[in-house]
Image (tube, rainbow, N blue to C red):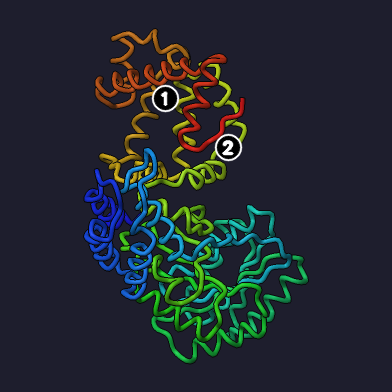
Amino acid sequence: MFPALADKISDAFKSLRGLGKISEKNVSDALQEIRTALLDADVNREAADEFIANVLKSSVGEKVLHKILPEQQIVKIIHDEIVELLGGQLDPVAYTKKPLKILLAGLHGSGKTTTAGKLALLLKNDGYRPLLVACDVYRPAAIDQLMAVARDVDVECYRERDVKNARKVAKHGMRHGHDNKFDAIIFDTAGRLHIDGQLLDEIRDIRKITDPDEVFLVADAALGQESVNVAKSFNGALSLSGIILTKLDGDARGGAALSMKYVTGVPIRFIGTGEKYSDFSLFHPKRMASRILGMGDVVTLVEKAQRQVDDQEREKLSKKIKKAEFTLNDFLVSIQQIKKMGPMSSLLGMLPGMAKAKTTGDDSAKMKMTEAIIQSMTMQERAKPNIIDSWRRTRIAKGAGVELRDVNALLKQFAQMQKVMKSFKGEKGARRMQEFAAQFGMNVPQ
């Protein structure tokens, strides 16, 4: 996420290496590079200037602590200032109220209807029974699109095809939700190619009718500062309670995310990071700041794994790993579980120090090839790969439609994995695993 910005900030730190103290003289050049990087990322100029001034004020005169390098101290200071720029120590939304009413607003093309489905799925997974209400009565395919989204996430959609009054649809949809005991009602309103008085008047009326608990603007991160300007206009008309920033997985420069709270005063509450309905999460300023600085986001990675990976399968694999009984068949299951979590490139970005890591070739193609190789093996070969001689390797390669070297590479990789797992076996191994995990701030139960 924001790789160009992360790279430029990282390069700016290089000039601070080997210094014994951070001073205005030796830090000013680095901060000028960071300011340029922020402006290139389409961050609001006033926000960028205030950010740099705050970093300079916090960093000048900082003494280098024992075994702590100047660039590491600067990273900490910049991290804290990015957190503030993104919204500060913002508490993520924790919904407990039932029934819950949410009004979605936004321009046409911002991903509002898909976001309605993503939000419904998130609430559904949190124990709610959501209802989507189709308040876009103008766009011909809008109702059909929302109905398709509702089917995809397995929730109900309320619509009225013959009614062209969005206010009436909102009122009737709210009544339907109440009468049928839905405890989360999401109103998907009409979008426009630009902000106009008619659109805002209609949404104001829908807000009065529904009296929502939350009013979210769905904004496209790829539009950069234009999204920020849109948010200002909508907030002036509706008093937004939050912003949902979509398409953060694209090539957006990141300015919208970094400027939104500073310019509008409205916090980002959720972010969309992919096309799948599961590519949607609460917004955490601290986690985002860590990812921008290439420090990873292990917490989000773990949460993503918990949502996507089968609990029973995870427990079964965990026990096998601890006993060093992990087989190629288990490896196949692991690959299939990992595929559910998304592209490998996005997962690497959540690991500390791996933000610059580049995946070569097509990740999904590589996983498919690994699956094909293992599926070409007999169950005995998967359980005991040491019996796979040259004749068997040739047969497996032909069955999978790959080269012999691909089979050899997989077997070598798996042998190395088994060796590592055996080193974690027993009491000493358990302690070693705990020490290893502690390096990443994780806890492994005994």
Q: Is residue 45 above or below residue 375?
A: below
Q: Quadrant of residue 90?
A: bottom right
Image location of residue 442, percent across then percent down = 52, 36
Q: Nearer the viewer, mark 1 or mark 2?
A: 2
| Residue 320 left/right relative to 224 | right
Residue tagged 2: 310
Of labels 1 and 2, earlier in sequence is 2
Q: Are marks 1 and 2 in contact (CB under 8 Å)?
A: no
Image location of residue 233, percent across then percent down = 45, 84
Query: Front-most of 295 and 61?
Result: 61
Image location of residue 109, percent across then percent down = 40, 72
Q: Quadrant of residue 29?
A: bottom left
**Helix, strand or loop at mark 2:** loop
| Residue 313 left/right relative to 437 | right
Query: Front-most of 227 and 407?
Result: 227
**Helix, strand or loop at mark 1:** helix
Image location of residue 306, percent across then percent down = 56, 42
Q: Quadrant of residue 152?
A: bottom right
Specify the label residue 320 is tagged with: none
Question: Is residue 304 among what the camera can see?
Answer: yes
Q: Is residue 131 above or below residue 64?
A: below
Residue tagged 1: 375
Q: Say which amino acid is labelled 1.
A: Gln
Q: Quadrant of the C terminus?
A: top right
| Residue 197 left/right relative to 156 | left
